[in-house]
Amino acid sequence: MPATFSEAGADVTSCPKRMTFGPCGGVRADGACEMQPEPCVFGAVVPWPGPPAAGVAVTAPLVLTDLSVPPGDAATLSATVRTLAASCDAMLVGEHQDRPDFPPGLLARIVHAAGGSPWVTLACRDRNRVVLEQELLGLRHDGLATVLCVTGDGRAYDVRPEVTQVFDLDGTRLASLAASLGLPTAVAETPTAAPTALRPSRLVQKQLAGAGIAVLNHTDSSARLAAFMAEARQAGLVIPVVAAVAVYTDARSAAALGALPGLDLSPSLVADVLNAADPVTAGIDAAVAHARELLAIDGIAGVNLSGLASGRGVEFAAEVQAEVGRRIRAEHPR
Ligand code: SF4
């Protein structure tokens, strides 16, 4: 492959994820690559070439709830969807490097059959381009789901070392492919990932590629999110944006949030919840208050309830998420 240079003069063909539209969301705070002990090769946002793609407009869910269920367990997935169905507008199925699940199309069918509106994540790490195309064609055939197109984090060295990492495409190119097939297409961005100054523009490039909606990873403060949104809109962002709300009600679910990108929970906020006479109620109250704050930001059209919610098991965690969702919907009738 001939060398291709970023505006900063770096050879971007040496990106370990073979990104075209970098930098990915895994750039370390000091500018280092997430995959190798070298600086990230992208010193600037790579602009979307050509005219804006005509993507499918996506109505923002006011409440988009993460589905956190064991992989390959249709009964538990269906039961969880039924618990959540009346509390949210859509449900998001993630993809995990260490927990292979059913294919996205099958997950969408199960969620839909149980009464939910499915969003499914499609990551480039574990599928070559042909398989990504197969998944997209299947999703288009069923017409049930919005597809969240992501590059995917690099696989940790100690997780399934026998498994290759593909990265035929990156999230932006996958979004372009999904949009070209007429699928409702969502993309992700991490406002707090280095280099933070590039993130608003990078999200705009995904919109130009055909994305109809964006889901943001956690930010450590509402002020920071508001600044990100102002810059993104200034740069031309018009698609609706969904922001992340962390849901936790005990030590285990609070600790699990440490793994979420961009989330730097205030220790005093966590202590207030965990030391409350009723931590479950306190955690629900905190999540609802956070959602209220985020929904007041210009351009934020919905919230994504993420995190484990509770360490007491899938069913109890879903009840917690459902209560948070119900209260947010009650405060923001549509
Ligand atoms: S941080 Fe991401 S985009 Fe940058 S070189 Fe590494 S893998 Fe590529």
Image: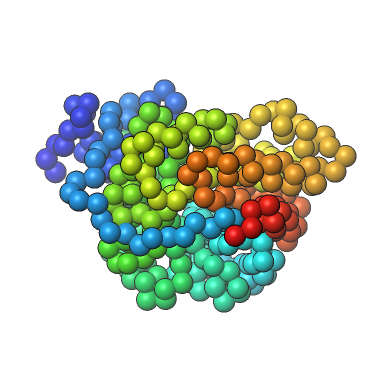
Q: Quick one: which residue is furthest to the left in this view?
A: 2
Pick the residue in front: 16 or 172: 172
Q: Is residue 78 visible?
A: yes
Q: Quick one: which residue is furthest to the top in this view?
A: 30
Query: Residue at (16%, 37%) from the top-left corner?
Result: 4
Query: Residue 297: percent from the left, percent from the top?
Result: 54, 40
Query: Residue 51: percent from the left, percent from the top?
Result: 20, 51
Q: Is residue 161 visible?
A: no
Quarter of the image where ligand 1 sits: top left
Quadrant of the frame with the C terminus? bottom right
Pick the residue in front: 240 or 286: 240
Is 133 on the left-hand or right-hand side of 275?
Answer: left
Task: Name above or below for residue 88 compared with residue 25.
Answer: below
Task: Name above or below for residue 36 compared with residue 146.
Answer: above
Is 263 on the left-hand or right-hand side of 145?
Answer: right
Pick the residue in front: 311 or 298: 298
Query: Residue 264: percent from the left, percent from the top?
Result: 59, 31
Query: Residue at (64%, 58%) from the top-left corner?
Result: 333
Pick the residue in front: 30 or 143: 143
Query: Residue 287: percent from the left, percent from the top?
Result: 68, 44
